Amino acid sequence: MRRTLGIVAVFAVLATVTIAWRVYTPNTSSVLQGAWVVTSWEWEGEMVPEPQPGLIVFTSTHYSMMFVNGAEPRDRYPGEEITDAEMVGAYRTFTANSGRYEVNGNEFTTRAYVAKDPNYMGDWPENANTYTFRVEGETLYLNWPSDWPYAIKGTFRKVEGEAAPF
């Protein structure tokens, strides 16, 4: 009888430790993990079927986003010296930010630690943006936060393991 109680007690302790471990250990696995290139954009309801380059990389806890904004290729600088107007034009046509992210159901929340725009990263770690998404096979469908001043949707293709993202 004592032996049976001892075995039951050991299993009870192991079960408790296992449950506690699962509850208090963050989930570092996500369907988002990997590298994703943009295949289409929708800006304010208008499709951009042949978008300029864009890449999102997700690790288990961090992300990095970089996109060329719009449907047209970025202008290259014509000479050796870069003018202020050319720098402003280049700044406006590019989005870049990186930091931590968390997944909750069909949403993920980013907190930009570093960004091209200093205001975007300014309140880190309180600068949360929540996106909705779904993954179907190797395709990621992404909606930008609903409180943004314009509606953005993107479709991405997973390129993990490929030699080039295109």
Image: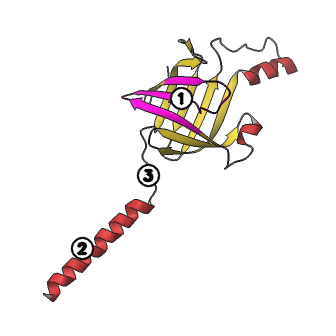
Farthest residue, direction front: 147
Work out whether mark 2 precedes mark 3 in sequence or the reverse, and give the earlier one.
2
In what element is the residue under mark 2? helix
Q: Is residue 25 above or below residue 164?
A: below
Q: Which residues are magenta?
A: 130-155
Q: Quadrant of the N terminus?
A: bottom left
Point 67% across, 49% down: residue: 126
Across and down, in percent, residue 100 comes to: 58, 46
Which residue is depicted at the point 45% across and 50% down? 28
Which numbered marker is on residue 27? 3
The residue at which mark 2 appears reads as 11
Most foreground residue, 99 or 127: 127
| Residue 139 located within the stretch drawn in magenta | yes
Mark 1 or mark 3, earlier in chain: 3
Q: What amino acid is labelled 3 in the image?
A: Asn
Is residue 11 shown in magenta? no
Label 2 sits on what residue type? Phe
